């Protein structure tokens, strides 16, 4: 203790001794010649790195030099299935794409134009990739719709030409800026890697010089640490050079430790520091188990493994323990990844089966014989609906997805080719149809001034029905022949309406009667007996039908009000029924209280309810997803209304099930 205090109070250097290359024998002679305190003063702790000190007293007492501990080879890293960089970037783009749901093409183009103003490619690459994925999806949908409309109009796929719209041009220009910046960045990175290689090779030469140097232990160790720090600060090198570079570096490091023979205490302290660093890496790896983004977790795990390689050995007794801890965290993350891709593979198989079923439906349409325009149009609508469902089905595996799309597209192409051939054969038929429709125009024009209202009306209706049975005429005559026929019919029926205008008073009376009936419906109160309520509602419906016509301009509004009131009564009955069902369930639960097995029965009932709730939620999600794919046509509006009705009913049922589940939890 006294000697240590003297060392701290009177620091001296050993440069003179080291410059004279004092050997172990000379130290032995010095110990025999002088007092130990003088030797201790000469062997100054300052010759060692500031973070670690060799116990000089122990070395002097034992009359030995510090035992060297060579740098070991890298500890084996876990066999983890790290994803490729491109795969990770694709997964990050999908996650980023979730934030872009609901944006249209213009919004996406504006986001891209804003993003590419940032020259930092690393900062924007994921966002750009996500924008591109989302834009291409919307653009492909627009292109598919454009192609389908072209094909349905009688065009062929071979003659279809798509002209870029301004949004596509703006998108391509902005994306071109990004690609140019990315290419420049990659070029700079490759140049930097070559520069890094030269820098690291220079460090290797310096390390060789240190190994061959006769400088003091302190100087060589400080220089060695400085080289290590510089080595770590230098970035990556070309991949082809990386392995050889690392092997040379590790070999020289081992040579250095063999040369300077750093003592066990320094080695132990260094390994203790390495142990602390590896414990910190273990904790970071374990924290990654809570990371929601699997892609981010794996990229972070990759970095941790790279950091692990940079850290030196740990105490032998801790080596296996610390490695097993780090490997266990890595294995768990690997397991999560494998489970994720197993689920993805199962989902892709399900999607493939769904697409096979859609292919079969599309191929069934090829087996029919369609001999009219209406038949072809009906089947075209069916194929469009099948194609709409196709868009809602997720992807299969890449190989299967390409094959199944080729099959589905072949079915569509064959269908529209047959349709094209049919319409080509219709040209002669259209000329004949024009002659028939011209004759009907002459017959209608002969009746348009008639005052024999009944017979003329019947004859015109027959003419109109016959008109409907006649197929299309050449396109250049379609509008002209229709206007001629419509003018003749309108002339007669306008004259007839003027003649029968006296009936308006009757229609006004009917309007008043229906309004009075609406008031009765509003005042009606539902009873607890469902059959009585149904009888009352049927009576309202019968009275409504028995009342005659109302003025045409009032027809839509009053019918709408009537439907809303009747629907409201049915909704109220359904709510009452749901409430009764819930109360009945509560009474059943109350009746189980004295049953010894009530707990098990309640839990089983709760499990059944949870399964039904989840199933119903899944059905609602599917319905809400599919409803967005209906186009704005009359047929699709009817289907949309039907879907909305199903969704509303499902949500009401869901509320009842959730209320029953609360009762079981009480």
Image: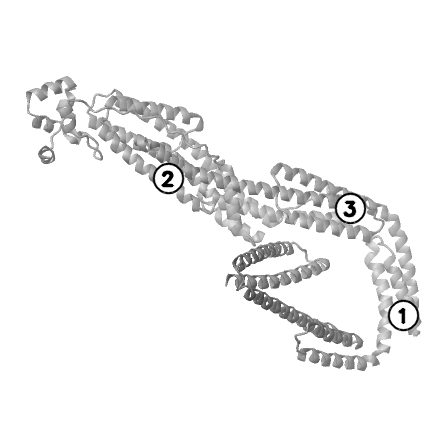
CB-based contact (under 8 Å), mark 1 and mark 3: no
Residue 38 quadrant: top left
- Distance from Cα at disc 1 to Cα at disc 3: 41 Å
Q: Nearer the viewer, residue 666 or 555?
A: 666
Q: Nearer the viewer, residue 381 or 476?
A: 381
Mark toward the start of the polypeptide (2 vs 3): 2
Is residue 110 among what the camera can see? no
Q: Is residue 277 above or below residue 216?
A: below
Q: Position of residue 567 (x, y in %)?
A: 68, 70
Q: Position of residue 453 (x, y in %)?
A: 91, 73
Q: What number is the disc on residue 365?
A: 3
Report the residue marked by disc 1.
Answer: 457
Please state which of the two labelled residues, at mark 1 or mark 2, is closer to the viewer: 2
The secondary structure type at the circle numbered 2 is helix
Report the residue marked by disc 2.
Answer: 282
Can you name the residue that lies furthest to the top here? 25
Residue at 11% across, 28% down: 40
Mark toward the start of the polypeptide (1 vs 3): 3
């Amino acid at each position: 203790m006294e000697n240590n205090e003297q060392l701290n109070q009177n620091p001296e250097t050993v440069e003179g001794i080291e410059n004279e290359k004092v050997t172990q024998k000379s130290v032995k002679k010095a110990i025999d010649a002088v007092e130990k305190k003088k030797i201790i003063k000469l062997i100054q702790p300052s010759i060692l790195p500031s973070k670690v000190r060799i116990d000089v007293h122990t070395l002097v007492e034992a009359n030995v030099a510090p035992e060297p501990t060579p740098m070991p080879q890298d500890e084996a890293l876990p066999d983890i299935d790290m994803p490729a960089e491109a795969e990770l970037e694709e997964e990050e783009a999908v996650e980023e794409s979730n934030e872009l749901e609901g944006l249209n093409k213009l919004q996406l183009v504006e986001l891209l134009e804003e993003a590419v103003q940032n020259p930092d490619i690393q900062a924007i690459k994921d966002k750009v990739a996500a924008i591109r994925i989302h834009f291409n999806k919307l653009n492909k949908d627009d292109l598919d719709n454009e192609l389908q409309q072209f094909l349905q109009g009688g065009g062929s796929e071979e003659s279809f030409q798509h002209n870029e719209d301004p949004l596509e041009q703006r998108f391509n220009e902005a994306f071109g800026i990004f690609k140019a910046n990315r290419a420049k960045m990659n070029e700079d990175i490759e140049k930097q890697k070559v520069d890094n290689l030269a820098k690291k090779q220079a460090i290797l030469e310096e390390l060789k010089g240190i190994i061959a140097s006769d400088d003091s232990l302190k100087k060589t160790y400080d220089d060695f640490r400085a080289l290590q720090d510089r080595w770590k600060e230098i970035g990556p090198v070309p991949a082809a050079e990386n392995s050889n570079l690392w092997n040379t570096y590790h070999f020289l490091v081992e040579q250095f430790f063999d040369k300077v023979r750093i003592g066990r205490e320094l080695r132990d302290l260094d390994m203790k520091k390495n142990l602390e660093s590896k414990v910190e890496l273990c904790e970071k790896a374990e924290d990654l188990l809570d990371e929601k983004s699997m892609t981010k977790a794996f990229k972070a795990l990759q970095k941790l493994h790279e950091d692990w390689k940079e850290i030196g050995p740990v105490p032998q007794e801790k080596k296996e323990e610390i490695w097993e801890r780090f490997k266990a965290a890595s294995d768990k993350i690997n397991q999560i990844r494998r489970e994720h891709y197993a689920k993805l593979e199962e989902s892709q198989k399900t999607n493939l089966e769904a697409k096979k079923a859609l292919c079969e439906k599309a191929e069934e349409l090829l087996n029919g014989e369609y001999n009219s325009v209406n038949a072809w149009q009906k089947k075209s609508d069916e194929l469009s609906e099948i194609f709409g469902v196709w868009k809602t089905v997720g992807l299969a595996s890449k190989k299967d997805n390409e094959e199944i799309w080729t099959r589905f597209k072949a079915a569509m192409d064959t269908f529209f080719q047959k349709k094209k051939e049919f319409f080509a054969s219709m040209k002669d038929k259209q000329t004949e149809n024009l002659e028939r429709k011209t004759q009907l125009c002459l017959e209608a024009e002969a009746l348009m001034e008639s005052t024999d209202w009944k017979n003329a009306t019947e004859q015109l209706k027959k003419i109109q029905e016959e008109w409907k049975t006649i197929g299309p005429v050449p396109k250049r005559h379609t509008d002209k022949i229709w206007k001629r026929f419509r003018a003749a019919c309108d002339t007669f029926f306008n004259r007839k309406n003027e003649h029968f205008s006296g009936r308006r008073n009757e229609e006004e009376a009917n309007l008043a009667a229906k309004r009075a009936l609406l008031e009765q419906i509003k005042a009606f109160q539902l009873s607890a007996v469902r059959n009585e309520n149904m009888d009352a509602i049927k009576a309202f419906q019968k009275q409504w039908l028995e009342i005659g016509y109302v003025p045409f301009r009032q027809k839509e509004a009053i019918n709408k009000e009537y439907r809303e009131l009747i629907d409201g009564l049915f909704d109220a009955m359904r709510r009452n029924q749901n409430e009764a069902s819930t109360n009945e369930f509560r009474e059943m639960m109350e009746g189980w209280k004295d049953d010894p097995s009530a707990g098990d029965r309640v839990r089983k009932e709760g499990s059944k309810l949870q399964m039904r709730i989840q199933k119903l939620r899944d059905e609602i999600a599917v319905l809400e997803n599919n409803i967005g794919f209906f186009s704005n046509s009359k047929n699709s509006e009817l289907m949309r209304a039907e879907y909305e009705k199903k969704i509303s009913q499902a949500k009401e049922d869901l509320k009842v099930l959730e209320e029953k589940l609360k009762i079981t939890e009480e």
